[in-house]
Image (spheres, rainbow, N blue to C red):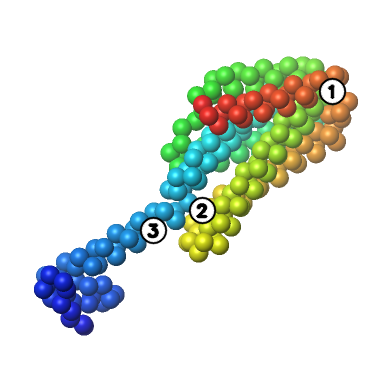
Amino acid sequence: MAIKDNDNGHMNVAGPEGHLVEKNGLPSQETNKLLKVGMRQKFMTNFSANLLYRNFLDRALRVNQAGELAATLIYTAQTPPVVQAHPHLRPLMKHMHDQEAGHFKVFNGLLAKHRIRPTAMYPVWQAAATLLGWATGMMGREAAMACTEAVETEIGNHYNGQVRELFKWMTELKESGKELDPELKILIEEIKRIRDEELEHLDHAVENDAKEAQPYQPLTDVIRYGCRGAIWVSERV
């Protein structure tokens, strides 16, 4: 055990981990300074505590949760009229609904974990999604599938943008030699998984005659622009 005089004339003893302690067993001033620096560095390298990332996380998770709520409600409202006219589509509609409900659960958990509030537009999106699902379901199978195609096209692009942003941020951390929080990689993989399932829904929609909907182009354009507007608003409100 090493003993050292500090600047104040007190005797410091090197503890078992090399930290200096006073003879009374309390940490020395030097040790306190090192501990404070270490804690500060750990705080700054924790990705969820980083201010820039926190702002991104706030917007991304809020809009993702709102989007998955809307998707779940669209399928809930679409399924009865679609399945009544086309019973063979029941397994597919249930599969897509259940996946959306799973995505919604994931983002609910992430909002709670990171203490992020849901969008204030929640009631509006609930009503709009239910109306969209019911209307396209009543228009027929093709219109319901065109709705899925339009929504999933926008959502797929949206998730791709998030993955790129997260990956860029992770790469910058690595290049600067900072410690990576394992949560960052987990979040990227989770969003990629959800994106891939959304794109699977898009493929199902096209396979089930989405492009035969009448009127296809005006219908999908309105839905896609509506999705973009909802994303923009949910990120901010």
Q: Residue at x 50, y 30 (%)?
A: 118
Sooner in the amino-acid sequence: mark 1 or mark 2? 2
Residue type, label 2: Glu
In which quadrant of the rendered image does the N terminus lie? bottom left
Tell me the SS state at disc 1.
helix
CB contact under 8 Å: marks 1 and 3: no
Measured as percent of width and height from the top left, residue 167 is found at 61, 52
Q: Which residue is mark 2?
A: 183
Which kind of residue does numbered mark 1 sit on? Tyr
168 in relation to 65, above or below: below
Query: Farthest residue in the bottom direction?
Result: 1
Which sits earlier in the primary sequence, circle 2 or circle 3?
3
Q: Which of disc 3 and disc 1 is earlier in sequence?
A: 3
Q: Position of residue 181 (x, y in %)?
A: 49, 57
| Few, some or many residues within 10 Å of mark 2 (<14, 14–19, 20+) | few
For label 3, count other residues whose C-alpha is less than 10 Å away and answer few (under 14), some (14-19) or many (20+).
few
Quadrant assignment, res 83: top right
Residue 214 vs residue 184, the one in the foreground: 184
Foreground tag (1 vs 3): 3
Category of crowding for the residue at label 1, using alpha-carbon neighbours closer than 10 angstroms: few (below 14), some (14–19), many (at least 20)? some
When asked about the image quadrant of residue 213, the answer is top right
- Residue at the disc numbered 3: 41
| Residue 116 can be seen in this image | yes
